[in-house]
Amino acid sequence: MTGSELKESETSTSGVVKNRLPNLTKVQMFMMTFGYFGTQVAFSMQTGSMGRIFQTIGADPNNLGFFFILPPLAGMIMQPLVGYFSDKTWLPKLGRRMPYLIGGSVVSFIVMLMLPNAGSLGFGFGSAAALWFGAVTVLFMDLAANVSQQPFKMIIPDMANETQSNSLWSMQNVWGSLGSLVAFVFPFLLTALGVANTAPRGEVPMSVKISFYASAIILALSAFFTIKNVKEYTPEEMAKYHNISAAEQNEKSSIVNVLKSVPKVFWLLGIVEFFVWFAIPYMWTYSTGALAENIWHVTDPSTAGYQAAGNWFGIVQAVYSIVAIIVGLFFARLTKKTRRPAYTVSMILGGIGFLMIAFGTTKLSSIIAFALFGVAWIALITIPFTILTNALDGKHDGIVLGLFNCFICIPQIVASSISFLILPALGGSMAHMFIVAAIAFFIAGFAIWMVRDEI
């Protein structure tokens, strides 16, 4: 898979000479991206159900943000560590990034079987034991999910040249959106097939439990597929293709020194990411409550109406996943001239969608709202990473991408922490939290113009 000829060097507009890696075949590109489908089935099942699960087992809505501090905290710790250590790893039969995919997937599989049972162990509705069990389980889930997701992000700058990186990020996120689609519709389809969508007070419905179990199996199969089929470049090939000298290859760089050498776009994209990822936790946390409040006119998680809103959240998430898949096919053709305009338009559309969630009172309005968010979603998970990847030099790509994830995690922690203040200030209305999210999206859409897209 790695025998292509090295292409001639290219010079970016900043004057930096960059070697082009060999062009990957369509088969290679498929192998590198398809496995992301499984990791996103598992991750989306968790993020799409966390608000529902914790409210079902008795979490106070005013304190719900606490549980959403754990995922980004896990990501901020694990992804830089995975990047740092995997940059220095090479196992002849497994590679550089794949050993971490194995470890993360195994732990994720186990935790996926445990999380939906947080309310079924006799702790009692709203008990500290039930909530702590759920919180610790989510923490381990996110630690493992970050370990298993990061290899997919790192093999793109490892193996893709500038002409193919945009396509690979788009392909990977199309597969990821398809995985999210599967996760989001699982509870709805199982309910349609007759599986119970309600349960005794404090317990998670069987439709959600079975969805988690199925997602765990899909995760395991996709990880096995990737490990078996992706052949990473050897250290010698990496040095050749990225123009890394023997001295640089053996150099022991600290995280501080790596940060001193990152390109300027790393920091500027961090500002953009702050506003984007300040908004996203509110979508994950408050969508079920907002839909139940505006459309079903209920706030009690034990009611059939609230659980129906939880299933409907799965459907509208499926809508945004479908839109993201379709738009992602077009985004694969974006260039440096069109990436930033596409990002701005996408974030404005996403902000409008959030406002429709805040004020919409019908299922149709929620469908349109999440369709607009789908355009924003594929933009925010594709375009910044493409710009950053094209600015990297191949020497410390893993740790740089891991550190860049802090720009995704820190705003989530901030947003979740101050939600304790914002939600009461907005009258306790979960729907009104989307006004704040919309404003953040609008700011991010225009902040992208601070960033130069050179390649």
Image (cartoon, grey):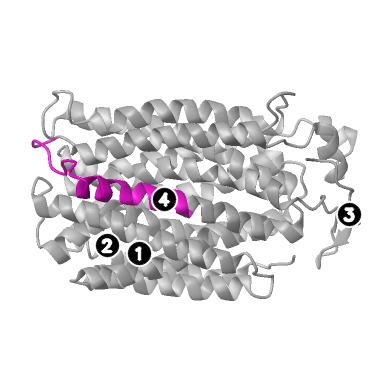
369 lies above or below 18 = below
Instruction: Measuring from the top left, give residue 331's x and y in whole percent.
Output: 59, 67
* Mark number displayed over residue 437: 1
| Residue nearest the observer in this picture, 328 or 434 | 328
Of helix, strand and loop, which one carries label 1?
Answer: helix
Residue 287: x, y in percent?
26, 57
The residue carrying pointer 2 sits among few (fewer than 14), some (14 to 19) or many (20 or more) residues within 10 Å by Cα, namely many
**Disc 1 residue type?**
Ala
Residue drawn at x 32%, y 37% as measured from the top left: 212
Q: Which of disc 4 and disc 1 is earlier in sequence?
A: 4
**SS at mark 2 in the image:** helix
Callout 3, which amino acid?
Lys
Give the quadrant of residue 336: bottom right
Q: Which residues are magenta?
A: 177-202
What residue is drawn where x is 22% and y is 32%? Answer: 131
Disc 2 from disc 3: Cα separation: 50 Å
